[in-house]
């Protein structure tokens, strides 16, 4: 790939659903860090990364897999970016072959997580408060449903 093909020309306008990529399964343990994923992206011509989120999921059969979400500030209009985006538009994914012969599948992240200035403790507190609210609202809904049944029986004893 020539320097001209990979030169940053301009910025591609994107909608929010195209502002990040998703790797559903990271095949190698050595890649399972934000820095390594950023380095991989840089090596294939994906620049201007805002952040990388790595998530671990346990499948039904007990195996664990790592996923990555790569969020970009902008998409630069380079040959590689056009190649990757075109493949995702056409096939739903772009396959990149690692030097060891394994593949990494890149897809658009359809559910990007918004950034926040809150720290982990503030988020945990928000979650605890939301869980309490859910319990309170569930109890209130149950009480209202019971009240509706009672009122319906008063109107129609055969109900």
Image (cartoon, rainbow, N blue to C red):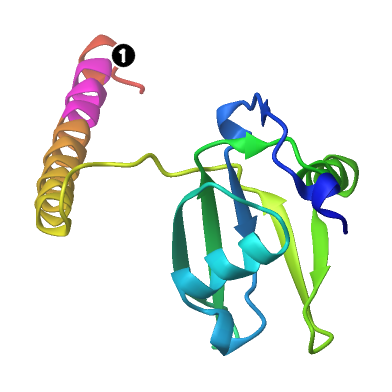
Q: Label 1 neighbourhood size at 10 Å, few (<14), some (14-19), many (20+)?
A: few
Q: Which residue is mark 1?
A: 156
Q: Is residue 67 above or below residue 71?
A: below
The residue drawn where x is 72% and y is 33% is 9
User: Would you say 41 lies left or right of 123 here?
Assistant: right
| Residues shaded magenta | 144-152
Quadrant of the image containing the C terminus: top left
As rendered, which of 92 and 149 lies closer to the eye? 92
User: Would you say 72 lies left or right of 7 here?
Assistant: left
User: Would you say 24 lies left or right of 114 here?
Assistant: right
Classified by dominant secondary structure, the portion drawn in magenta counts as helix
The question of residue 149 being in magenta is answered with: yes
Residue 76 position, x and y percent, is: 67, 38
Q: Is residue 84 above or below residue 10?
A: below
Quadrant of the image containing the N terminus: bottom right
Residue 59 position, x and y percent, is: 57, 78
Residue 104 position, x and y percent, is: 74, 71
The residue drawn where x is 87% and y is 48% is 87
Figure quadrant of residue 137: top left
Camera sees residue 56: no
Q: Is residue 97 above or below residue 124?
A: below
């Amino acid at each position: 790939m020539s320097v001209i093909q990979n030169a940053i020309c301009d910025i591609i306008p994107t909608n929010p659903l195209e502002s990040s990529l998703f790797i559903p399964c990271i095949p190698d343990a050595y890649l399972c860090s934000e820095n390594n994923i950023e380095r991989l992206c840089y090596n294939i011509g994906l620049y201007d990364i805002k952040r990388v989120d790595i998530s671990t999921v346990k499948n039904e059969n007990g195996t664990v897999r790592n996923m990555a979400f790569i969020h970009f500030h902008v998409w630069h209009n380079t040959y590689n970016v056009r190649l990757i985006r075109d493949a995702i538009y056409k096939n739903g994914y772009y396959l990149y072959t690692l030097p060891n012969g394994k593949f990494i599948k890149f897809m658009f992240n359809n559910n990007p997580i918004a950034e926040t200035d809150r720290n982990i403790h503030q988020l945990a507190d928000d979650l605890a408060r939301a869980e309490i609210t859910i319990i309170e609202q569930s109890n209130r809904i149950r009480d209202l449903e019971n009240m509706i049944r009672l009122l319906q029986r008063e109107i129609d004893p055969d109900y």
